[in-house]
Amino acid sequence: METLDKGFKEKVQKMVNRNSQKLIILLVLIGIYVFFSIFGNNFATSNTLISIFNRSYYVGFLAIGVTFVIITGGIDLSIGAVMGSSALVAGFFFEKMGAPIWLALIIMIIVGTLYGAFNGVLVSYFNLPPFIATLGTMLISVALGSIACNVNTISYPTRFDAAGRGWYKQIFLSTSPQFPTGVIVLVVIGLIMGIILQKTKVGRYTYAIGSNEEATRLSGINVAKWKMFPYMISGMFAGLAAIAFTASYTSILPGTGKGFELDAIAAAVIGGTSLSGGAGSISGTFIGVFIMSVLATGLSSMGLPPHYQDLFTGIVVIGAVMFDMYRQKQNMKVKVVKPAK
């Protein structure tokens, strides 16, 4: 009975720790929003709120995907470049081969997933360090994207294209006073992925690999197989991010997307996903994405140049990592039980 009570208390304590961390970052998000509402120029308006949502779409998709990878204890540096490459390759079929726009959107997801599978094979079966494997894929995807478009700009249809080819942009973009429908798409997909992460075998094995890969292997689980899935999910969401990106921008340049992986990784880390693996959630990542978006929009409202966003984002990321390290140290403390006299 005492053992059962102890196990129950440990589970409750872990739940409290996770919820308290989410509460802290949620309060940080609210605090940042209130700060910019007071000191920013016309920040507390419906137009600004819609702008915050509109900036969250493609980074949000990237962050959802990379959350799975980071939970395994890995990293995916290629997602930003894969997003751009997926848009360029699909744009080649759309612009040069005359493919319908719906097929181009599917191609984006397929290309992104293939890049993710390539990363998964390198990490799972060839045992390459995730940093090196995904860095190599980042360079490859940039090159292949440039080759596909012959180093030319790819143009997607405008939102109000006369032929109706910009229909998918209506899903993501809205103007005041309309509600930004892209948020609904992002949240619904996020909820689905949250259920997959928490309630399915893919999610359970993702956490298990990140918590203790060797113990997972010894328990009879095919670690190489299940380690591939997070990278494939990350690549697939890079393809979804490409759709969201082309919804926001009509012209796609070669090399587009490089650097966005840092925003996505930062959002996941700020949201409580541990870089050492074994911990993280989609809901926390969402909060991290909106913190990033509020920072970018708020700093612009104060008239500060874009590089200030990098400065403050870096400070927030360092703070989030330090907090995660402190939390892990607290969890790893072993209570010394004195022998009974």
Image (cartoon, helix red, strand yellow):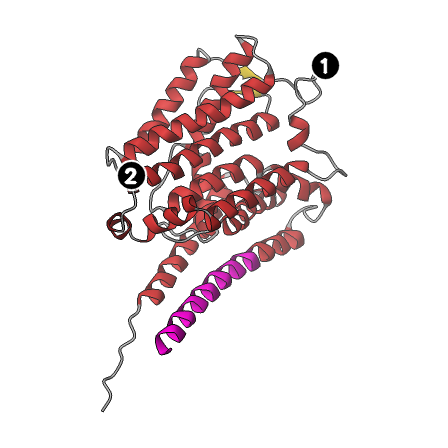
Tell me how many marks there are. Answer: 2
Horizontal placement of 98 versus 119: left or right? right
The residue at 47%/17% (across/down) is 89
The C terminus lies in quadrant? bottom left
Asked if marks 1 and 2 touch (Cβ < 8 Å), the reply is no
Q: Amino acid at mark 2?
A: Ala
Which residue bears the numbered disc 1? 162
Which residue bears the numbered disc 2? 224
Residues shaded magenta: 1-28
First-in-chain label (1 vs 2): 1
Between 36 and 267, the one nearer to me in the picture? 267
Between 224 and 34, the one nearer to me in the picture? 224
Q: Is residue 153 visible?
A: no
Examine the rendered structure and indicate whether residue 168 appears above or below residue 157.
below
**Residue sitting farthest toward the right:** 177
Q: Amino acid at mark 1?
A: Ala
* Whole-number angstrom distance, CA of label 1 to CA of label 2: 49 Å
Residue 158 appears in which quarter of the rendering? Answer: top right
**Residue sitting farthest toward the top:** 97
Examine the rendered structure and indicate whether residue 105 appears above or below residue 213.
above
Horizontal placement of 329 versus 290: left or right? left
**Structural crowding at the residue carrying mark 1, measured as other residues with C-alpha within 10 Å and reported as few (<14), some (14–19) or many (≥20):** few
